[in-house]
Amino acid sequence: MAAYEWMLLPVSGSVLLCFLLVPLGYQVIARGVIFADLAIAQWASLGTLAGTAGTCFVLNQNLAGASVTSLVFALLAAVAVQLILRHLGEAKEAGIGILYVLGASFAVLLVSNDPHGAQSLQRAASGDLLWASQELVIATAVMAFLVWLLGYWFPGWISGAFFIPVFAIAVTYAVSLAGIYVVFATLIITPLIVGSLHGKKPLTASICAIIGHLLAIACSVIRDVPVGPAIVVATLFTACVWPIVVGQRRFNKPKTD
């Protein structure tokens, strides 16, 4: 058992990540800007690369495990998303797509002369949740607690202007913890399939996402496969199977007088 104690941080981080991102994913889908999270995540990742490369040495500091440069870039992207939503109307998805491609292109240019640039880009996209840091896990726990607390006491906050800045900060820590692919999958898959299509609550969709994450971590440890892509596949599989399993259980439930 002691041999697996090192898994406590990645498992805890994975669970907290689901509780943080799934409620936010509902609002992303409701606003009809599904790729806004991908654009902000890409710019948060760009900020991390910029800080690592030393191009923003003044901001090359960490705040609870996340690069300050990453936070600044994510907030700038959030401002850009707000402007796009306000001024582009029906073309908002096109504008957000341009924002994403611009961030991805800057990232490639930034590491083009780095012999380890390809590895840096892969790490930013896929992440490495198995080596989660304690600082990031604690920061994710705090963010998740605040999101659920705000949802309980002030449910209207999530549909207001305050959502995008909070979302940008949450995505920054999530990307630092798990990478762009995992963040996008966790935000969208279970809210879309389990939530939006079947009318479930965020807690149910969060539990479904957690199961997918834990299956992927187990598969990654046992089969030695990259944990990020494994989480994307396992979360989609779990979300697709979830309504069938839950529906079957309800069908087989004995009737009571």
Image: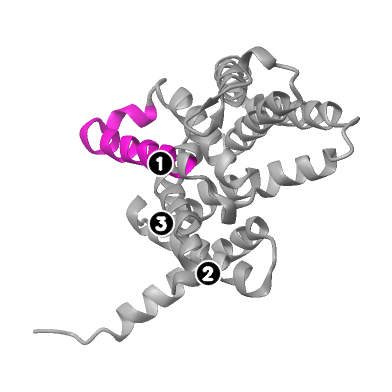
Q: Main secondary structure of the magenta part?
A: helix
- Please state which of residues 71 and 4 is positioned toward the viewer in this rendering: 4
Residue kind at label 1, given as amino acid type: Ile
Q: Residue furthest front?
A: 2
Q: CA distance from mark 3 to mark 1?
A: 22 Å
Q: Give the label, 1 or 2, closer to the camera.
A: 1
Please report whichever mark, 3 or 2, sits nearer to the chain's N-terminal start: 3
Residue at the spot 58% in from the left edge and 47% down from the top edge: 178
Please report whichever mark, 1 or 2, sits nearer to the chain's N-terminal start: 1
- For disc 2, the marked residue is 215
Direction from residue 102 to residue 218 in the image, left or right:
left
Direction from residue 253 to residue 37 in the image, left or right:
right
- For disc 1, the marked residue is 138
Q: CA distance from mark 3 to mark 2?
A: 16 Å
Please report whichever mark, 3 or 1, sits nearer to the chain's N-terminal start: 1
On residue 205, which mark appears?
Answer: 3
Residue kind at label 3, given as amino acid type: Ala
- Please state which of residues 18 and 115 is positioned toward the viewer in this rendering: 115
Residue kind at label 2, given as amino acid type: Leu
Q: Magenta part of the protein: which range?
A: 136-159
Residue at the spot 50% in from the left edge and 52% down from the top edge: 192
Is residue 49 placed above or below 2 in the rendered structure?
above
- Residue 111 lies in quadrant: top right
Q: CA distance from mark 1 to mark 2?
A: 22 Å
Which colour style is shown?
one colour
User: Which corner quadrant holds the C terminus?
Assistant: bottom left
- Residue 81 lies in quadrant: top right
Residue 118 visible from this viewpoint: yes
Label 2 neighbour load within 10 Å: few <14, some 14-19, many 20+: some
Q: Position of residue 50 (x, y in %)?
A: 72, 24
